[in-house]
Image (cartoon, helix red, strand yellow):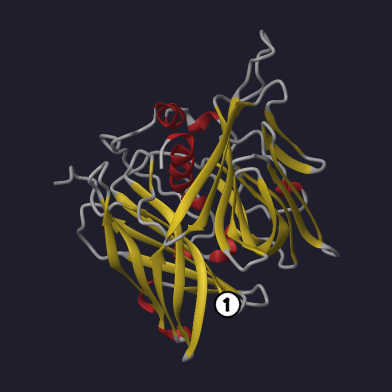
Amino acid sequence: MKGLVALLFGLLFIAGGFLLWLQSDPVTAPSPGFDPLLQALLEVDPDAFEAPITSDPLLFPRDHAPHLGVRSEIWNLVGQLVDEDGHAYPFQFSLLRFALRPGAAERTSSWATTAVMLSGLRLYEPDRSRIRVRTAERLERDALGLAGGESVPARVWVADWSLTLASSEATGTHLTLNAAGEDLGLALELSGSIAPIALGELGLFGREGGAGFQGYLLPRLSLQGRLTRDSETVPVQGQAWLEHGWGNLIGGTGPVGLDRIALQLTPDQELICLQLRRLDGTGTPIPSCALIREDGGVQRFQRREILLEPRGRWRSAGSGFQFPVAWRLAIPLLELELTLDPLVKDQESAGPLPLWSGAVRVAGRQQGVPIQGRGWVEVSAESVTEPD
């Protein structure tokens, strides 16, 4: 995967999907294929921007809208589409806003801006005996209406792509996604009845917030709409979840790698796990998980309650780095045992560290009953030293 889409999902991984951000010593050398745009974004001084107060409660619909005073903001929509013939298409739509400096632009030119906005769409589709990955992207400056955000209604857009969000206690949450395109495009209506789950409620690693960032998760969104491929449009339905985070989502990266797993399980459950491990291969990895139950409640699990280990690896022909891409995950307290397998192995993303990000299929047993699911895995390479 190359170009803007690779950069976009590399940036998403740096943000840790907004769930966790680690401040540590910077890496001495970027990975092969490191993008100059990402380097420029990493060099922006984070102290010049507003930092969310993580103890403040989230308010809706206010916090669906853009937070224009912060350094960076992410909307990340992940799920699966199903067409009328029963074919499944895992997808990811992401929109990111990055401030280049705080405050409003000095309007010496109508092109003047203080922010850039990127958006990417990734779709996995069956293609005979293999899975094909299709991508599309948009990149614009926040000027001249080319990209931007507004509060009423809560809406963000990049070129002709847009995401609109609304919610109330009476009607739940509603989203509208328009990502037009003849080669690849989506037009979806999404709705959910579970209230947004604040970052602190997940309790991953026992943290109640982050180092200058805030966010929430919208699980279990039902969707319907249209999928366009090669100028052919078909109706689809399915399920998805949304992550929305804002604040200091980009910072110095250090010697600690992050593995991130987000799964939708049947029946209605979501499981989110993070694992910290040293990139030099020493020490014992530290996992942490949060289960979102059918009623929307959260159940948390820490390192001694979790078994998370690789069961398959893939080595990049381009960079030479090796990634754990297939996993075994077990939580004995839930009588839950899962295996995770990548739909496509070649899913290396651009970034200051070698990264892998892609869709996975899930199978296993819960309380002795077979269980299936789908999800997304994002992992650091097993070592950042020069590969053999």
Q: Position of residue 138 (x, y in %)?
A: 58, 33
Location of residue 204 with respect to 107 vertically, above or below = below
- The residue at the far front in this view is 128
The residue singled out by tag 1 in the image is 266
* Residue 252 located left or right of residue 282: right
The answer to whether any part of residue 211 appears in the image is no
Q: Amino acid at mark 1?
A: Thr
Q: Is residue 193 above or below residue 61?
A: below
The percent position of residue 191, horizontal first and vertical second, equals 75, 61
**Farthest right residue?**
170
Residue 209 in sight here: yes
Residue 69's image quarter?
A: top right
Please state, as top left, top right, bottom left or bottom right, where the N terminus lies in the image: top left
Q: Residue at x 45, y 87 (%)?
A: 335
Image position of 362 (left or right of 149): left
Observer-nearest residue: 307 or 132? 132
Asked if residue 329 lies left or right of residue 83, the reply is left
- Between residues 179 and 75, which one lies in front from this camera angle? 179
Image location (x, y in percent) of residue 59: 74, 53
Q: Residue at x 39, y 78 (%)?
A: 330
Given residues 305 and 172, the one toward you in this image is 172
Kindly identify the residue that appears in the image at 19 percent across and 45 percent down.
Answer: 385
Name which residue lies at 69% across and 13% down: 110
Residue pushed farthest left?
388
Q: Residue furthest top?
A: 108
Image coordinates for residue 235, horizontal then vertical, percent: 71, 58
Q: Badge 1: few (under 14), some or many (20 or more) residues near its Cα, within 10 Å?
A: few
State the SS at label 1: loop
Going by the image, does 387 lie left or right of 142?
left
Picture quarter containing residue 231?
top right
